[in-house]
Amino acid sequence: MTSLTSFAPLLVQLDWLLRIFVAAICGAIIGYERAIQRKSAGVRTHIVVAIASALFMIVSKYGFADLLNMMHSIALDPSRIAAQIVTGISFIGAGTILVRREQISGLTTAAGVWAVAAIGMAVGAGMYAIGILTTIFLFFVQMIFHDDILINKIIFHVRFNIQIEAVNKPHILPQIKEELEENQVENIYVKILDVSDEKIVFNVDGIINHKKDENDIIMALRKHPDITRISHTRGGQ
């Protein structure tokens, strides 16, 4: 009869995979909130970073046990190398992030590079199974969330934020707020940024259905005779 200890390595590997899976769920939850706020780093990016972080931690904690067991009389910290890899690959990942006209791209690519570094560390440490399983897991995460179809099915409302400059007339704020409500903007919050005798500048924050085209709302507001300028940034402040 085979003893339970012969199954210990497999159980340990499954425990490591469970940790990575739980980290992915936690990252997805945080990413979901960020996606609602229309931030650049959404569900997919947070999942990738969470998976990579969990794998880095597993490698740092368990990946050098064989080396330490062989060298009882020598005190060393092999995880320092892992720490340097994490720092170094972060600079490479940062180079893949591009900002063009207030639009950010390359975040998930940067996170993917970081995750690949973690996978390479795992395999290099002799943790073949967890490295391969994480690769498969990340591959399916990237494929499933690539075109945002699944994300759009679970996200119902997103944040809508614009800055408006208008002629300072009596009741201008209630009029614009009414216009926004007619365009299905909910939970409207208005904050005045600047005001003078001639003009008023204010920020509008609200929530819209994720299927609602923001451009339609902006074009509808632009027809208001007292609005002189509208600035819109995806994701708000």
Image: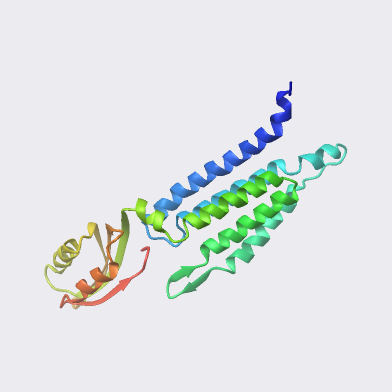
Q: Is residue 72 above or below residue 201?
A: above
Q: Nearer the viewer, residue 119 or 114?
A: 119
Residue at the image point whose x is 70% and y is 52% from the top: 121
- Toward the left, the furthest residue is 170
* Among the 4 quarters of the image, the one containing residue 9: top right
Determine the image quadrant of residue 181.
Answer: bottom left
Count of labels in the image: 0
Foreground: 116 or 76? Answer: 116
Residue 128 placement (x, y as % from top left): 71, 46
Nearest to the observer: residue 160 or residue 22: 22
Q: Residue furthest right?
A: 73
* Coordinates of residue 50 in the picture (x, y in percent): 55, 49
Image check: 45 left or right of 152? right
Q: Can you name the residue that lies furthest to the front here?
A: 1
Q: As drawn, is 195 to the left or to the right of 112?
A: left
Residue at the image point whose x is 15% and y is 69% from the top = 172
* Above or below, 222 relative to 214: below
In percent of the image, x 36 and y 51: which residue is there? 154
Quadrant where the C terminus sits is bottom left
Quadrant location, the N terminus: top right
Is residue 196 visible in the rendered image? The answer is no
**Identity of the residue drawn at 46% across and 49% down:** 28
Would you say 188 lies left or right of 143 here? left
Displayed quadrant of residue 221: bottom left
Relative placement, left or right, of 78 versus 189 is right
> What x and y, as percent, mark residue 87?
66, 58
- Which of these two is toward me, 195 or 22? 22
